Image: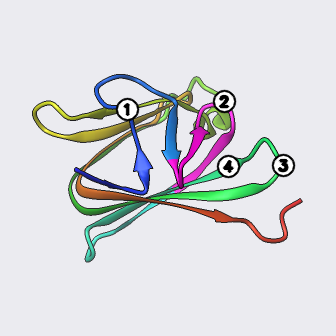
Amino acid sequence: MILKNIGIEANKPITEVKVDNILLDLHNMADFLGYSYDVDGHTFEMLFLYSMRTGEIYHLRLRFNAVKHLDVSPRDSEMPPGEDKTLGHLHMETEGEEYIEFSFWGGIRITVQADEVIATLEPVSGWG
């Protein structure tokens, strides 16, 4: 999998990634907003709301192109819905079949195999 504008330490559970040369803590400083899948384009996008320590708010968008496999496992009905926003960890596997898996505290698990992932960090205008 080709990584563009994102650094992910492979083959172990992590909570931090590097985007635009900025280390982002996706567990403590980000809320997961949701995802979308374009069937015709074979693209999958995940969107996070990221709060910088300076108080600035950004959208972090992860776009997976040429998706080969996508699996979204259901949330745990015993967990409060708000826990779906909190990333427990992510794991990028590079040995054998490459994939990235996102595990959220609410039980949702998203696994993606794709040719590439592109990260963008965009300021949210009018926030706060």
Looking at the rendered structure, the kind of residue marked 3 is Gly
Q: Nearer the viewer, residue 25 or 35?
A: 25
Circles 4 and 3, Cβ within 8 Å, touching? The answer is no
Q: Which residue is mark 2?
A: 80
User: What x and y, as percent, mark residue 117?
Assistant: 34, 56
The alpha-carbon separation of the residues under discs 3 and 1 comes to 26 Å
Alpha-carbon span between mark 2 and mark 4: 21 Å
Tag 3 or tag 2, which sits nearer the N-term? 3
Query: Counting residues from the N terminus, which is met first, the one under dot 1 or under dot 4?
Result: 1
Q: Which mark is residue 111?
A: none
Which mark is nearer the camera, 4 or 3?
A: 3
Q: Nearer the viewer, residue 54 or 48?
A: 54
Q: CA distance from mark 2 to mark 3?
A: 27 Å
Structural distance between the alpha carbons of marks 1 and 2 = 30 Å
Q: Is residue 2 above or below residue 111?
A: below
Residue holding disc 1: 9
Q: What amino acid is labelled 1 in the image?
A: Glu
| Disc 4 target residue | 50
Q: Is residue 81 above or below residue 112?
A: above
Give residue 50's position: percent from left, percent from top: 67, 49
Q: For marks 4 and 3, give the CA distance.
A: 10 Å
Left or right: residue 95 versus residue 72 is left
Callout 2: few (<14), some (14-19), or many (20+) C-alpha neighbours within 10 Å?
few
Q: Which residues are magenta?
A: 19-34
| Residue 68 left/right relative to 116 | left
**Badge count:** 4
Q: Quick one: label 3 or label 1, which is nearer the N terminus? A: 1
Q: Main secondary structure of the magenta part?
A: strand
In this view, 74 is above or below 69: above
Dot 1 alpha-carbon crowd within 10 angstroms: few under 14, some 14 to 19, many 20 or more: some
In this figure, which residue is indicated by the disc labeled 3? 55
The quarter of the picture where the C terminus appears is bottom right
